[in-house]
Amino acid sequence: MDEGFEFDHQIAVSPTGQGSYDALIDAGWVVGGGVNGGYLLAVLGNAIRHALPAKPDPVAVSAYYLSAARPGPATVTVDVRREGGRVATVAADLVQGEDTRITVLATYGDLDRFGDDVRTTAVEPEMPAVEDCVRGSDAPPEVLALAPMMGRFDMRFHPDDVGWAVGRPSGTGLIRAWFRLVDAREPDPVSLLMTVDALPPVTFNLGMMGWAPTLELSAHVRAKPAPGWLKVHHETRNLAGGMFEEDCEVWDSAGRLVAQSRQLALQPRP
Amino acid sequence: MDEGFEFDHQIAVSPTGQGSYDALIDAGWVVGGGVNGGYLLAVLGNAIRHALPAKPDPVAVSAYYLSAARPGPATVTVDVRREGGRVATVAADLVQGEDTRITVLATYGDLDRFGDDVRTTAVEPEMPAVEDCVRGSDAPPEVLALAPMMGRFDMRFHPDDVGWAVGRPSGTGLIRAWFRLVDAREPDPVSLLMTVDALPPVTFNLGMMGWAPTLELSAHVRAKPAPGWLKVHHETRNLAGGMFEEDCEVWDSAGRLVAQSRQLALQPRP
């Protein structure tokens, strides 16, 4: 990993002993009144990676969001619950002051040792060429001012999925986009933990423009992503009872389904 | 809950103080060399329910399976990580002797207070009538002998999805079935935690008949199920790298999507 890329600085952790790591939550990932949950998960995921040098890749990560994080110092604690065989499982917390922001269970392994049989039946999303999609950075200045995180990556929306930006939500719970980090920093298993939660909530396309706080997000990283643009597919199929699930798929430039996630979020208030 | 039903006895817990509960893992839920993971999750879920009387319903539960449980005594410990507002979040472990079998994060609430707007776009599975489906109890006696758990419920498979039972797997990663507990014990939010992991692994229909150990399972319970038969839909779309994800939907007799889960499991060894 090249520490010259801003993302690597932003997720950096320093060990302070006994499974504890210092981190600095970067103001560049603010969105609305909070900090993007995917970025916070990547900070946690990076600390866990340091705690498990022989099993450096997230395989399954489940995060429960307890309170809203703020830019500034944070501590990540990693407690190895089981290690042995192909995988290790840990419990980890991201804490600021007295408050736990996120508590996590995670299983890590070495994705290079997981075999390369691929019998994926899921279908890769069809996307127009990158240059024919709609740049996230073309959002109105007042939107960008509320979402500094939009400056952290290049996101190109499927033209069919951006009606919400001009007051004409598609009415489908679907948003698809091309995605890559700024500086052309290439994706890796830890950055995928951020990518699964980087798009706007799919509820935007259902006409609900508010913030949708995540209760829980579980991600599976299924392979190391190839370099280049990622395709991200977000969809909800069950908006009910004031909550909705949001499923995410991330496909790499080689056409492989490299990450899947599902989150449960609170429906935005009108 | 009527303690006259066998399921309620099998998931019963007794508080021993400080968030600790005694339980007895029932031999009736053995399958192959282990105990069904869904049943174990319902035992955990029942202990958490006791620890949170004002928020009795599982909303999101993420379970990481660390070692194979055995019939016999077990202890469940519940640590409340955050309580306030609509939901509470806990960490919980199911332990036998010195070994943690399952470690869990869970968010609970009161589903009766979650509103009744339903804008589900997922489509209810089409199933032939219960009496036109294939009884799980018609499996060969040698299969039933290995899976005492098949006696805990009435499961009626979609006729298109049982080719694996006669050596002709469908080749699709799909199994659908009607489901209800014996004694006509009605479903509730805790029993749904079992139902999402009660069907045979979908890999059976891909010609892989072995045991598929779960690494991680996350379930969302989205509504209290109506009485009667449940429809269960299991599917995988990404068998790769020696692992597969299995998505489950549970629909109740009123046609509502009441639970969704996703698990990551190890591919059965040939």
Image: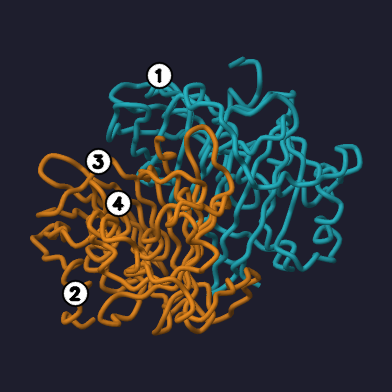
Chain colours: A cyan, B orange
Q: Do the residues labelled 4 and 3 touch (CB within 8 Å)?
A: no
Q: Which dot, 4 or 3, sits closer to the camera?
A: 3
Q: Which residue is drawn at 35% across and 31% down?
A: A88
Q: Are marks 3 and 2 in contact (CB under 8 Å)?
A: no
Gap in Å between the C-alphas at discs 2 and 1?
A: 46 Å
Against A149, residue A200 (above or below) is: below
* Residue B218 rendering spot, x and y as whole percentages: 43, 54
The answer to whether residue A5 is left or right of residue B193 is right
Between A52 and B79, the one nearer to me in the picture: A52
Badge 3 or badge 2: first in the primary sequence: 2
Q: Name the residue under label 2.
A: B6
Q: Which dot, 2 or 1, sits closer to the camera?
A: 2
Q: Which mark is drawn over residue B67?
A: 3
Query: Which amino acid does the dot numbered 3 rest on?
Result: Ser
Q: Which residue is drawn at 69% across and 49% down?
A: A233
Quadrant of the image containing the C terminus of chain A:
bottom right
Q: How crowded is mark 1: few (under 14 residues within 10 Å), some or many (20 or more)?
A: few
The answer to whether residue A100 is left or right of residue A223 is left
For mark 2, name the chain.
B
Gap in Å between the C-alphas at discs 4 and 2?
A: 27 Å
Q: Name the residue under label 4.
A: B91
* Residue B186 rendering spot, x and y as whole percentages: 33, 81
Q: Picture quarter containing residue B78?
A: bottom left
Gap in Å between the C-alphas at discs 4 and 3?
A: 17 Å
Badge 4 or badge 3: first in the primary sequence: 3
